[in-house]
Amino acid sequence: MHLQRRRWRRLFFIVMVGAIVIPPALPGYVALATRAYRYSNPDDVPEKRVALVFGAGIRQDGSPSAMLADRVQAAIELYEAGRVRKLLMTGDNSSVYYNEVVAMQRYAVAHGVPIEDITLDYAGFSTYESCYRAREVFGVERAVVVTQNYHLSRAVYTCRQLGVEAIGLGTPDWGVYSPRVMSFYTLRETLAIFKALWQLHITRPPPTFLGPYEGIA
């Protein structure tokens, strides 16, 4: 009985140490795994056919949030520089009152991107689902993913694990947005990385909506 108690105590200790040590290490692992595929300067980004731009919220008037506008603007710069030829806007359109991708499209068109070079994914409810659908629904095999630096490692890692040969362009975040905002997003990202690794390597759930193939012309 005494030996059994010692074993249970040892197991409990191992579990507790793992619970403390592993979660903070996960962002480091994902960052290291994607280090060679992440860029901060648009001029350094290798040419790919498609830029995959992730949603990041809209205002009450339907215009892009500051973070979303920064992402779309970075994709526009890639397009204007000839680094990409098509933009795939992916985001949340879960209700008629909330449409990230149309807001992204309007912003890009207003800044000179032809509407025929923009494809909308209305069911990109998460990074995982956006990357999954980019490959399976839109036929994207290679892409530049565009998002803020705090999110870039997970976005690139997720896409690559789901069959998209992705590189990433990160837009500035710390120093641009308030420390309070960035502290919140950074903490949330740690939890999101844990969830992403669980989905990618354990469960592999299908997206909320898959639907027929809609390859980008």
Image (spheres, helix red, strand yellow):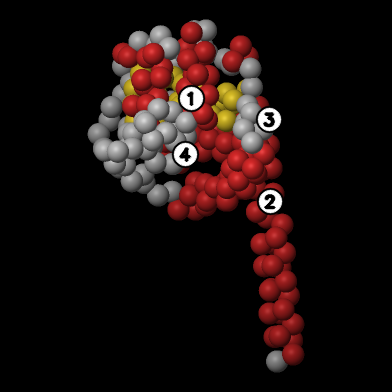
Query: What is the three-letter code of the residue carrying label 1?
Result: Ala
Sequence-wise, the earlier of marks 1 and 2 is 2
- Looking at the rendered image, the disc whose residue lies closer to the viewer, 4 or 3, is 3
Q: Residue at x 51, y 14 (%)?
A: 78
Between residue 66 and residue 201, name the one nearer to us: 66
Regarding mark 4 in the picture, which secondary structure is present there?
A: helix
Q: CA distance from mark 3 to mark 2?
A: 23 Å
Pointer 4 residue: 127
Pointer 2 residue: 24
Sequence-wise, the earlier of marks 3 and 2 is 2
Where does residue 192 sit, x and y in percent of width and height? 54, 47
Regarding mark 1 in the picture, which secondary structure is present there?
A: helix
Regarding mark 2 in the picture, which secondary structure is present there?
A: helix
Pointer 1 residue: 69
Query: What is the three-letter code of the residue carrying label 3?
Result: Gly
Sequence-wise, the earlier of marks 4 and 3 is 4
Pointer 3 residue: 175
Q: Is residue 34 left or right of residue 162?
A: right
Query: What is the three-letter code of the residue carrying label 2?
Result: Pro
Q: Pointer 4 and pointer 3: residues touching (CB < 8 Å)? A: no
Q: Residue at x 43, y 28 (%)?
A: 64
Q: CA distance from mark 1 to mark 4?
A: 18 Å
